[in-house]
Image (cartoon, helix red, strand yellow):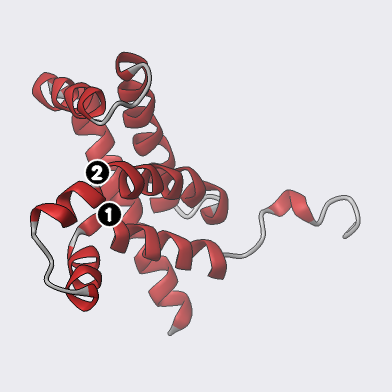
């Protein structure tokens, strides 16, 4: 059962990021929106960071979906989620005007990016080690 849940998590999260990255590459409005969002969040070099992020989502999402080195595939996606959680999510949480610490925590977990980060972290922690970590000592 655990393997099935792991594979389903890889397929779902990988598919989500691959589709998201593909849309940001192909659809001009999505691409321009991402550049504007990065500019608004003061991310350095948004014209370079936006396509790099979109291609990273596509490539690493696809490799995660295909279960190709899931630990290594999930890490760049986790970094993307972490950057969003540090730059954008606090502003979104503040916009909800949380009443107390519990309300603030619920708001954090209600937003998708922190939940994606937790799922990707779980995938990284439960994934088998990459094939080259045991080499050449396992020969």
Left or right relative to 32: residue 45: right
Q: Is residue 133 visible?
A: yes
User: Residue 137: x and y, percent?
Assistant: 91, 56
Left or right relative to 96: residue 51: right
Q: Residue at image x 35%, y 67%?
A: 8
Earlier along the polypeptide chain: callout 2 or callout 1? 2
User: Residue 75: x and y, percent?
Assistant: 51, 49
Question: Which labelled disc corresponds to residue 113?
Answer: 1
Rendered-image quadrant of the N terminus: bottom left
Q: Residue at image x 9%, y 61%?
A: 97
Label 1: how many Cα within 10 Å (few below 14, some 14–19, many 20+): many
- Does dot 1 land on a helix, a strand or a loop? helix
| Front position in the image: 12 or 39 | 39
Residues tagged 2 and 1 counted as in contact (Cβ below 8 A): yes
Mark 2 or mark 1, whichever is nearer to me: 2
User: Residue 131: x and y, percent?
Assistant: 70, 53
Query: What's the CA distance linking mark 2 and mark 1?
Result: 10 Å
| Front position in the image: 53 or 3 | 53
Rendered-image quadrant of the C terminus: bottom right
Left or right relative to 96: residue 111: right
Q: As drawn, which residue projects farthest toward the front?
A: 100
User: Residue 115: x and y, percent?
Assistant: 30, 63
Question: Which labelled disc corresponds to residue 88?
Answer: 2
Q: Can you tell which quarter of the image residue 100 is in?
A: bottom left
Q: Residue at image x 14%, y 27%?
A: 30
Q: Is residue 12 visible?
A: no
């Amino acid at each position: 059962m655990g393997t099935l849940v792991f594979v389903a998590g890889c397929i779902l999260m990988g598919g989500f990021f691959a589709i998201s990255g593909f849309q940001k590459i192909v659809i001009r409005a999505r691409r321009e929106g991402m550049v504007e969002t990065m500019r608004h969040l003061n991310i350095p070099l948004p014209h370079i960071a936006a396509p790099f992020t979109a291609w990273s989502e596509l490539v690493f999402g696809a490799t995660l979906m295909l279960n190709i080195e899931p630990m290594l595939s999930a890490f760049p996606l986790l970094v993307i989620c972490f950057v969003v959680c540090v730059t954008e999510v606090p502003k979104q949480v503040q916009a909800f005007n949380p009443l107390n610490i519990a309300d603030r925590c619920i708001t954090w977990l209600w937003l998708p990016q922190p939940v994606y980060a937790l799922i990707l972290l779980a995938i990284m922690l439960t994934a088998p080690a990459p094939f080259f970590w045991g080499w050449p000592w396992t020969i």
